[in-house]
Amino acid sequence: MRTPFVVGNWKLNKTIAEALALVTELKNQLGSVRGVAVGVAPVFTALHSVAKRLEGSSIATCAQDVFWESSGAFTGEVSAPLLADAGVTWAIVGHSERRQFFGDTNETVGKKARAALAAGLGAIVCVGEMLAERDAGRTLDIVDSQLAGGLVDIAGDVATQRLVIAYEPVWAIGTGRTATPAQAQEVHAHIRKRLTEQYGAQVAQAVRIQYGGSVKPSNAEALMSQPDIDGALVGGASLEASDFIAIVKAARPS
Ligand code: PGA
């Protein structure tokens, strides 16, 4: 069965000292929690220190983005091999904020995912529709095209081990408005169907599909109990240890 995976996406928040304080608390308090995998995604400048502090724990250090080339004349970018060198084991790609504000497209998201996987990292590929798209009945079409672009040339055995999809409806991110468990489950089941078409049932049953968008301690359990929701990508509520820990505990298999 799939082990749920809960990742805190800290976005553009926390100094190195603040990041270390938070992960130290997480390391101390989550050490005994079984049955759920946990990760945190600090800003680039804190990655190495956080990875060092998390050594000897099962909490993964994740990057919020990654560039697709390994090295060269690409001012301002950070590559997958250099993330691995810093102690990172997962990269988030295609977050809606990257798509909205930084020009990430389905095609470049696919390049980033392939680069992360080629460097031995795991890739969390984010998909999700905007409000106008949901209102127009286009949710599943949008998710389909994001998956089609994001999963180009990713082999089944690699997907089984190191691919995670995060379904994050854009209208639920940072808005306090969460998809209902039924709304989320509908899209998650659709994503698993597409994975089955691309890879077959065995791979599709192994790939974890996280939900993201205003996940809080109060709504986490209802969302996590849906059959195709395998953990969460948590923004705002991951910045406080107590809220994040409560969400991790809610994701434990019952
Ligand atoms: P939120 O963010 O939990 O603050 O809505 C989720 C995300 O953007 O990953």
Image: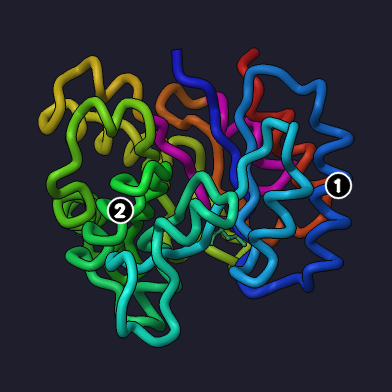
Read off the residue under disc 1. Answer: 24
Q: Nearer the viewer, residue 37 or 248?
A: 37
Asked if residue 122 can be seen in this view, the reply is: yes
Compared to residue 139, the image places residue 159 above or below, namely above
183 on left or right of 242: left
> Which amino acid type corresponds to the residue marked 1 in the rendered image?
Thr
Number of callouts: 2
The quadrant where ligand 1 appears is bottom right
Task: Identify the residue under disc 2.
Answer: 113
| Residue contact between numbered discs 2 and 1, judged by CB atoms under 8 Å | no
Provide the secondary structure element on which disc 1 rests: helix
The residue shown at (41%, 77%) is 77
* Front one among 252 and 70: 70
Q: Quadrant of the N terminus?
A: top left
What residue do we see at 20% from left, 17% from top?
A: 201
Q: Give the range drawn in magenta.
A: 208-225
Choose top left, top right, bottom left or bottom right for residue 244: top right
Q: Which amino acid does label 2 sit on?
A: Ala
